[in-house]
Amino acid sequence: MEVMTMILLVSVVSISISILFAYLFGLHHHLFFNKNKSSTTAAAGPLPPGKMGWPLVGESLHFLWAGWKGHPEKFVLDRVAKYSSTVFRTHLVGEKAAVLSGASGNKFLFSNENKLVKAWFPSGIDKIFPSSTRSSSEEEGIKLRRMLHAFLKTEALRRYIGKMDHMAQTHFEEGWENKKEVVVLPLAKDYTFQLACRLFASVEDPQQVDRLSKPFNLLASSLFAIPIDLPGTPFNKGIKASKIVRQELVFIIKQRKIDLAEGKASPTQDILSHMLLTSDENGNFMQEFDIADKILGLLIGGRDSASVACTFIVKYLAELPHIYDGVYNEQMEILKSKSPGDSLNWEDLQKMKYSWNVACEVMRLATPVPGTFREAIADFSYKGYSIPKGFKLYWSATATHKNPEIFPEPEKFDPSRFQGAGPAPYTFVPFGGGPRMCPGLEYARFEILVFMHHLVKRFKFEKVIPNDGKFVVDPMPIPAKGLPIRLFPHQN
């Protein structure tokens, strides 16, 4: 308890210091660079209701505390109720911000991407991904999304299902079988990371995968850490970890260049080959360092979100026997239709309708990415309120998913919510929406369903700590103790 208190105290102090630095820098910039500029004139109308919170800190501590307690939606829903408004004003991570809640807020932000709003990233991103300093993080993201489209669309991914199935088989044989108990979260991260390494860079050698994976916990958590680059801070550890991973990736990239030149690698085998062989509109090719940064970002995205979903799927299947039985029966019907040794294919995954409904309900209750920020690039009005240019805008997937007006009895686990047409548009948004909808949606669906298939065909299981439902959001939801479970292999 004393250790937890100390950690919380250090976190609060770090947040306060970082926000103070941000405030002082902003004040300096305003005084010395904007002396002769008039203030931005906002669109007509008052600012949204709300308050700025404590001096310098704003409401950041309340915002973070809700996540640490495992209920990130509470920060948003409490204020929506308090102000009787689905948009409110606040002050988060050193920035003036407006929070847009519910389906209408989601639709507005998704529909106005790059018109009225743009993506906004934490200030430390450029230190983790240095190549983004040569152009904006937004520009780098747009370029990457264009490249990903050809590789992550359904038609291209179909040919990868058999490989995914084989890798899942190996994963369960080596990590789960012949064990009485396992801790799910680290195993799920291993599974999703191995798949990402294979898809994005054709990395399959276990030792090479291990060298890449070891620094990843530090790296992923640093993306949303307080951006204080001092020895021993999470942010500093993340920068060091990114350099280690990048060095390994540059080695892989150099070898791929040789393999492509000698005909040992295919130009279309993965995203790495595509990046090496694709030039921009001026005929310039990406440098090795830039490619390493982009592959690094893909590995982070491919590892963390899906591993969270897989972990919570295990949690709910362990807690709800009738849900487990429904998934098990569906998967056994598919297994019976196949010959021994046959791999899963596209048609099999299309039959996993109930399993996917279960996965969606899991992602509604434990949304892998609780929300993200945008930035207003112009003055505009929303529901009669003025949003000035430069304001940060936060949209909360979790607050939408836990809103009783959208999902009645929001804490009840009910996969039938996703039957037929499913939830109304803009109400179920674990993958975002609009131009910035996650390009890996289908890839995530495939790897999650393959995971569920191999899990339930092998085991029943129970939680080692039955009443421990605690999870924290930092920055993604994770079980506080990693979800230890006890395995009971099927006799057949």
Image (cartoon, rainbow, N blue to C red):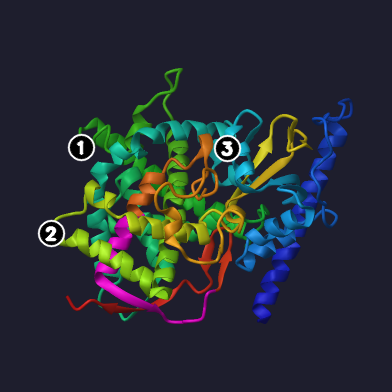
Contact (Cβ within 8 Å) of mark 2 with mark 3:
no
Q: CA distance from mark 1 to mark 2?
A: 29 Å
Instruction: Kindly identify the amino acid type of the residue bearing the numbered disc 1.
Output: Lys
Eye-nearest disc, 2 or 3: 3
Q: Residue at x 45, y 19 (%)?
A: 281
Residue found at x 25% / y 48%: 161
Residue toward you, 392 or 50: 50
Residue 53 screen position, x and y as percent? 82, 56
Region rendered in magenta? 448-469
Of the residues shown, which amino acid type is indicated by label 3?
A: Phe
Which callout, 2 or 3, points at the residue further toward the start of the chain? Answer: 3
Residue 167 shown left or right of residue 464 in the figure: left
Q: Which residue is mark 1?
A: 264
Q: Is residue 230 above or below residue 412?
A: above
> How far separated are the C-alphas under marks 2 and 3?
44 Å
Quarter of the image where the N terminus is located:
bottom right
Q: What x and y, as percent, mark residue 179?
A: 29, 78
- Indicate the secondary structure of the residue bearing disc 3: helix
Q: Earlier in the sequence, mark 1 or mark 2?
A: 1
Name the mark nearer the viewer: 1 or 3: 3
Asked if residue 277 is among those painted magenta in the image, a careful observer would answer no
Which numbered circle lies on residue 368? none
Do labels 1 and 3 touch, CB within 8 Å? no
Relative horizontal placement of residue 22, taking residue 120 as reference (left or right): right
Q: Element type at marker 2?
A: loop
Comparing marks 1 and 2, which lies closer to the viewer? 2
Query: In the image, what residue occupies the spot 26% across and 52% down?
Result: 351
The numbered mark, 1 or 3, whose residue comes first in the sequence reads 3
Q: Which residue is mark 2?
A: 341
**Label 2 packing within 10 angstroms: few (<14), some (14-19), many (20+):** few
The residue sitting at the left extreme is 339
